[in-house]
Image (tube, rainbow, N blue to C red):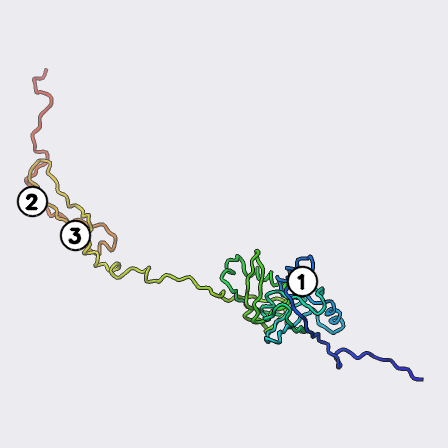
Amino acid sequence: MFSFHVFDPPMGRGFPNRFSTQYRCYSVSMLAGPNDRSDVEKGGKIIMPPSALDQLSRLNITYPMLFKLTNKNSDRMTHCGVLEFVADEGICYLPHWMMQNLLLEEGGLVQVESVNLMVATYSKFQPQSPDFLDITNPKAVLENALRNFACLTTGDVIAINYNEKIYELRVMETKPDKAVSIIECDMNVDFDAPLGYKEPERRSQNQDEPTEEETDPSSYADMDLGFRAFTGSGNRLDGKTKGIEPNPVPLAASDIKRNSRPQPRKVIDDDDALNKFIAFSGQGQSLRKKGRKP
């Protein structure tokens, strides 16, 4: 009597261990139910049917679950994570920005395949509008928004929501691959100049520099200085004719350049003029009449 056991074939030997199927895709606004699912629009994850979870649990799938989405009609693809398994059978729900990247319309077919991606170390983004610069700390805002994403794909235009406003950013570069996982990773983030951004014009240095005429000291020689020191006329105390009239002394350009005060021309003494004037030589009158002493 012989006995034998029937062994199930191990995973990976003749049987696919990769999830791959097609769904009709719709935007989240088409999701039935009273609950508001706007959270799907704020990230990079999709909603799949319960049958997908059942099939994935029987396969040797690496966690976290990441998927490659492909529109075979346009040959466009992107990558995503999964948020929940509550969609109707044969249907999956995608964020609006993801449908735009895939060029998918409501009810279009999308191929969904499970994938393994390398962990991101670097990514660069280009805001699609200069309005993104109005945010006080754009890097912190982006890093917080990426918590709702599972992966990034070079070339995608993702959308983030901040202060009730939607900002679009193109993924310009990712390392170490063109598609990377950003779950529990230490990733450096960089930015390109926003699309349509123009740097403010700088003033020409020539406008701030003085002209040659302004810097040439000789140009001061022809200027009318207006005030000249010691040019007024005076009168003698004794009423006699004045001796020597002081002449105005022109200022040299070098004196102006040194910001020194103009020096008056020295008056040469005239012996004849001085001899004509004798100090205190006039006759005076006494206020008290002269008389005999008592």
* Residue contact between numbered discs 3 and 1, judged by CB atoms under 8 Å: no
Q: What type is the residue that disc 3 sits on?
A: Pro
The x and y percentages for residue 110 are 65, 72
* Residue contact between numbered discs 2 and 1, judged by CB atoms under 8 Å: no
Q: Is residue 284 visible?
A: yes
Question: Where 243 sits versus 43, above or below?
Answer: above
Label 2 vs label 1, nearer the camera: 1
Residue on which disc 3 sits:
250
Alpha carbon distance from label 2 to label 1? 120 Å
Which image quadrant: the C terminus? top left
Label 3 vs label 1, nearer the camera: 1
* Element type at mark 3: loop
Marking on residue 31? 1
Q: What type is the residue that disc 2 sits on?
A: Asp
User: Which residue is painted at 62% across and 76% down in the image?
Assistant: 72
The x and y percentages for residue 37 are 66, 60
The x and y percentages for residue 132 are 52, 60
**Position of 189 compared to 9: left or right?**
left
Q: Determine the image quadrant of residue 24.
A: bottom right
* Element type at mark 1: loop
The x and y percentages for residue 190 are 54, 66
Q: Earlier in the sequence, mark 2 or mark 1?
A: 1
Q: Earlier in the sequence, mark 2 or mark 3?
A: 3
Residue on which disc 2 sits:
271
The local crowd at label 2, few if under 14, some if 14 to 19, many if 20 or more residues have their Cα within 10 Å, is: few
**Position of 254 compared to 140: left or right?**
left
| Closest to the observer, 216 or 50 | 50
